[in-house]
């Protein structure tokens, strides 16, 4: 192989690069601007609602990666790569993910319920909650994507599936929560919260109340 064998294809490629490179740079710049707009919009949404930065972080990451992937695919198309195979691969992956979601629907329902708990905030870490229909009560100390942990007065724990909170009546007593549910999702250990006090014994019935007055 001589220098001419390398130089001739390179000289033929330079006009193509000169024509497509500005378009590719504009597409990348558009992706960066779109990403910044999405981040700004979500931040404004959080400020105008009761959502915190931690609440919108998952949506921000998902949308950011989605914009990046679409930008890369469009840039590859500009440079002449065949997008048919790429779209077929992506559609196949999405179909497999959809089938997997159906197969693990119960796990997906717990995850969806966790997201709703973070957004709706029916309780916070540190609150005392009770589910009368399930005869369960305790102080909320932990939340993950599958269940919520309650600490009882004797030190034992109840682990409640998150989707159950949208099917049963829940009684809540505010106790000055030390952290939000969204913050607790980022922790690896339960919050350092003391267990609730033992229930007060029932007051004895006044025996003299039923005696007839002489």
Image: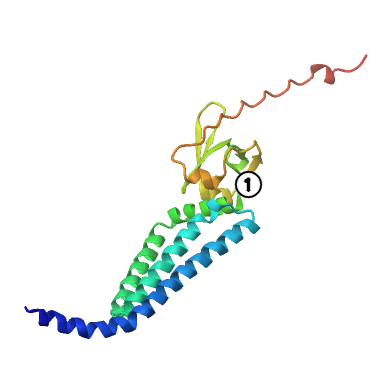
Asked whether 151 or 137 is in front, the reply is 151
Q: Position of residue 205 (x, y in %)?
A: 76, 21
210 or 55: nearer the viewer: 55
Q: Position of residue 100 (x, y in %)?
A: 37, 61
Q: Extreme right residue here? A: 214
Q: Is residue 203 left or right of residue 161?
A: right
Residue indicated by mark 1: 169
Quarter containing the C terminus: top right
Relative side of 5 to 13, left or right: left
Q: Does residue 159 sit above or below 4 in this rendering?
A: above
Q: From this viewpoint, which residue is outermost toward the left?
A: 1
Q: Is residue 2 above or below residue 209?
A: below
**Nearer to the camera, 115 or 72:** 72
Percent coordinates x, y for residue 72 in the rendering: 36, 71
In the rendered view, tell whether residue 146 sits above or below residue 75.
above
Q: Quadrant of the N terminus?
A: bottom left
The colour style of the image is rainbow
Q: How many marks?
A: 1
User: On the image, which quarter does residue 171 sit in?
Assistant: top right
Look at 57% across and 48% down and name the residue there: 165
Q: Dot 1 surroundings within 10 Å: few (below 14), some, or many (20 or more)?
A: few
Up/down of 213 relative to 91, above or below = above
- Residue 140 is situated, as x and y percent measured from the top left of the image, at 56, 38
Q: Residue at x 57, y 64 (%)?
A: 41
Which residue of the protein is positioned furthest toward the top in this rendering? Answer: 214
Q: Secondary structure at mark 1?
A: loop
């Amino acid at each position: 192989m001589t220098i001419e064998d390398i130089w001739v294809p390179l000289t033929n490629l330079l006009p193509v690069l000169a024509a497509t490179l500005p378009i590719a740079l504009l597409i990348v710049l558009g992706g960066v601007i779109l990403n910044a707009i999405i981040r700004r919009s979500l931040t404004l949404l959080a400020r105008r609602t009761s959502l915190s930065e931690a609440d919108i972080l998952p949506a921000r990451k998902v949308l950011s990666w989605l914009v990046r992937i679409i930008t890369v695919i469009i840039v590859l198309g500009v440079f002449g790569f065949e997008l048919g195979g790429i779209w077929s691969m992506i559609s196949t992956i999405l179909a497999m993910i959809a089938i997997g979601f159906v197969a693990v629907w119960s796990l997906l329902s717990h995850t969806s319920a966790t997201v709703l708990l973070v957004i709706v905030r029916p309780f916070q870490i540190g609150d005392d909650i009770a589910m009368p229909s399930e005869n369960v009560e305790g102080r909320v100390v932990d939340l993950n994507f599958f269940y919520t942990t309650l600490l009882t007065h004797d030190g034992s724990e109840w682990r409640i599936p998150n989707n159950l909170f949208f099917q049963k009546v829940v009684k809540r007593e505010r106790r000055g929560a030390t952290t939000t549910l969204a913050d607790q999702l980022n922790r690896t250990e339960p919050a350092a919260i003391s267990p609730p006090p033992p229930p007060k014994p029932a007051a004895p019935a006044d025996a003299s109340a039923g005696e007839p007055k002489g």
